[in-house]
Amino acid sequence: MASLPSVSYSITVRLEIDGRASAVSSLTNAVERVGGAVTALDVNSSGRERLRIDVTCAARDTNHAQAIVEALDAVEGVTVHKVSDRTFLMHLGGKIEMRSKVPLRNRDELSMAYTPGVARVSAAIAANPEDARRLTVKRNSVAVVTDGSAVLGLGNIGPEAALPVMEGKAALFKRFADIDAWPIALDTQDTDEIVRAVQLIAPGFGGINLEDISAPRCFEVEARLRELLDIPVFHDDQHGTAIVVLAALKNALRVVGKELGSVRIAMSGAGAAGTAILKLLLHAGAKDVVVCDVHGAVHQGRGDLDANLRWIAEHTNPDGYAGDLAGAVRGADVFIGVSAPNLLSGEEIAEMNEDAIIFALANPEPEVDPEIAALHAAVVATGRSDYPNQINNVLVFPGFFRGLLDAQSHRVTPDMMLAAASALAAVVTEEELSPHYIIPSVFHPGLAQRVAEAVREVALREGGVERHEN
């Protein structure tokens, strides 16, 4: 599947060219000839004979970006001076910072914000620890914790390399839900050490967002932390993905006029995301699901089942199907993939039931080419931004945590996830709903607030405490 130029591979080339009338068009033509896209062209200085121009282009990847630079350099009369990678420039010095919410302009303000006045506040919290949620950043803070073992599209790259992703996550928390999130990159991939480290830092946070921790370790880490901590623990790679998938599937089923409880679902992927999606689908009412991994369908007769696969085998595949993914897809109404690229062909998709739904979510290369799938299916969704119906966790986690924090919830429950999925699905109105629009944009006005309200309502019903500003 050929990729298109993307802003994530955006470069700005500063160059000089002679001042002839056709100079600018020769630059754009050079970029377009090698498949690039000019997104901006700025003349920053000019003279009688020469123009200095900044050409900003979108490329497919780093090799393509270099080809664009070479094409520009080959234009007659061009001298290339500097090439800037706009993505790297955005990350220089990090993407987040800490700022004080209170003024520190004089001795009085310093004495209240810090010593000696702060001692009174600390003493009050020592007497009543719950006051930490009211009197400190704890009430609005989330730790974004990773060990760098399963970074999307990159794999086990370690804590330092994972840090830019965690910073991005923190920036999204702030942008969409006004939550102060802090990247915590742990230099260990030992389950006991991860659990202990998070347990030790938990007093400073109102919630824990686990991120990019590989399966099966992530299951145990989350389960143990939920037992140990009195604040909500949420593994976004599992549950954020599951909530968005359920919301999108609700709307896709509305498009084709089918019900969740009556459709047959074939899934590819039994790791962290796949298992979480499965559990939420079953909780929402799905009844006929077959899950496949690299060895084929998961069923009770298989001899290689670990604890997670045994659970899947016991709760799915009622007919005991033991074949491969292609066979599982045959006659299915829905395919959900969170696994590996290019597993299915158009011919295999054509053997699904009429008005089939395809969620091919492997990134960056889906399980089946979306354009080929669209020839045979009624609704197609991917994890990519260059196709309609992008399944993106950022649609969920900011609002989800906003609701948890506002209710001062101590836990995450399946009913909160169902409420979040229903709220997210309901953002798409009947007038807007179509095969190419089953899930809203992350920039949809009020999206995070609607998810937050739904989660807060369930959290309060289940024992939370409404957050107050004073």
Image (tube, rainbow, N blue to C red):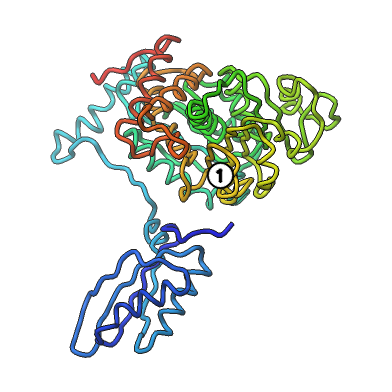
Instruction: Report the residue at 55% width, 23% height from top.
Output: 258
Q: Return the residue nearer the eye: 196 or 416.
A: 416
Q: Is residue 32 visible?
A: yes
Badge 1 density bin: few <14, some 14–19, many ≥20, Cα 10 Å:
some
Would you place residue 396 above or below residue 36 in this image? above
**SS state under label 1:** loop
Left or right of residue 292: residue 133: left
Q: Compare residues 11 and 183 and report the one nearer the observer.
A: 11
State the residue at coordinates (53%, 51%): 160
Q: Position of residue 399 (x, y in %)?
A: 39, 29
Amino acid type at circle 1 is Ala
Looking at the image, residue 467 lies above or below residue 77: above
Can residue 193 be seen at all in this image of the molecule? no
Residue 311: name its quadrant: top right
Q: Position of residue 349 (x, y in %)?
A: 66, 41
Horizontal and vertical percent position of residue 191: 65, 34
**Farthest-out residue, front:** 354
Q: Quadrant of the N terminus?
A: bottom right
Residue 85 against residue 454 in the figure, above or below = below
Determine which residue is flagged by label 1: 374
Q: Residue at the spot x=52%, y=40% of the render?
A: 381
Q: In screen coordinates, is 25 left or right of 390?
A: left
**Quadrant of the frame with the C terminus:** top left
Is 258 placed left or right of 318 in the picture?
left
